[in-house]
Amino acid sequence: MDWEAIGAASENVAAVAVCVTLIFLTIQLRQSNKSQKTAAYQTYIDARTALQVSLLQPEANAALLGTSFAPLSRTNEQLQDYHQVLHLSMTYFAMAFRLWKDGLLSDDQWNAHLSILSEFNGTEGFRLWWPAVSNFYAPDFVEAVDWAELLTTGLERFIEAVEAARSSDQK
């Protein structure tokens, strides 16, 4: 065997090694992506669990979901609790939004989250809180929350218009 034959054989072995390496890296990359998606979804589930646990506390539940929570008549400590519950909730919704954008949550799942956001937007406390903290969240998520707020105010205006029309019909 001469040096040229050895060189050609070496090139063939190197080409095969490169192909095997690329196949191995492709498999590893797919496994890594799957692991990252699983971890992201698990974080989402953990956040939902934390939110549910916090809502088991009656004051947190009333603060978040109750329209009776009037921020102007609350103490600073109550406002801090309210802020923490809302921040936990919005972090959860931001996570859900990101998973939806990445295709890990279905449109139906995201729409369910969006309808809950619309409920939040209907409360006086949220309307005072959100403009003060929205810059801490990703711009595309802020846009989604603001869109949900538009849905809420649009619905409120529609209901007011229907009620006004009913009143004028009864007169």
Image: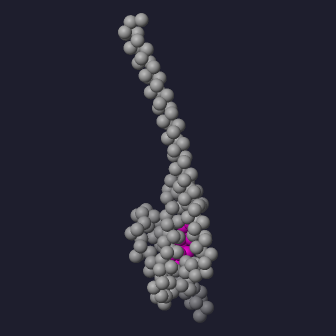
Residue depicted at 54% across the width and 53% down the height:
39
In this rendered view, identify the residue nearer to me: 143 or 46.
46
Work out which quarter of the rendered image holds the C terminus and state it: bottom right
Q: Position of residue 36 (x, y in %)?
A: 52, 50
Measured from the top left, where is residue 43 in percent x and y?
A: 54, 59
Q: Main secondary structure of the magenta part?
A: helix
Quadrant location, the N terminus: top left
Is 163 or 40 nearer to us in this picture?
40
User: Which residue is the extreme one toward the top?
Assistant: 1
Closest to the observer, 159 or 39:
39
Evaluate whether residue 64 shows in this view. Answer: yes
Asked where in the image residue 114 lies, by quadrant, the reply is bottom right
Total tally of numbered discs in the picture: 0
Identity of the residue furthest to the bottom in this view: 171
Q: Nearer the viewer, residue 84 or 102?
A: 84
123 part of magenta stretch: no
> In this view of the protein, can residue 110 be seen by the observer?
no
Q: Is residue 74 left or right of residue 2?
A: right
In the rendered view, tell whether residue 81 sits above or below residue 147: below
x, y (%) of residue 115?
56, 69
Question: What color scheme is it?
Answer: one colour
Residue reaching furthest left?
A: 3
Identify the residue at horizontal 59%, vertical 61% (top origin): 45
Does the magenta-highlighted stretch encompass residue 117?
Answer: yes
Q: Which percent across, then down, holds residue 166? A: 59, 86
Question: Which residue is rendered at x = 52% and y = 41% of the image?
Answer: 30
Start and end of the magenta stretch?
Answer: 113-122
Instruction: Identify which residue is drawn at 47% across, 80% down.
Output: 80
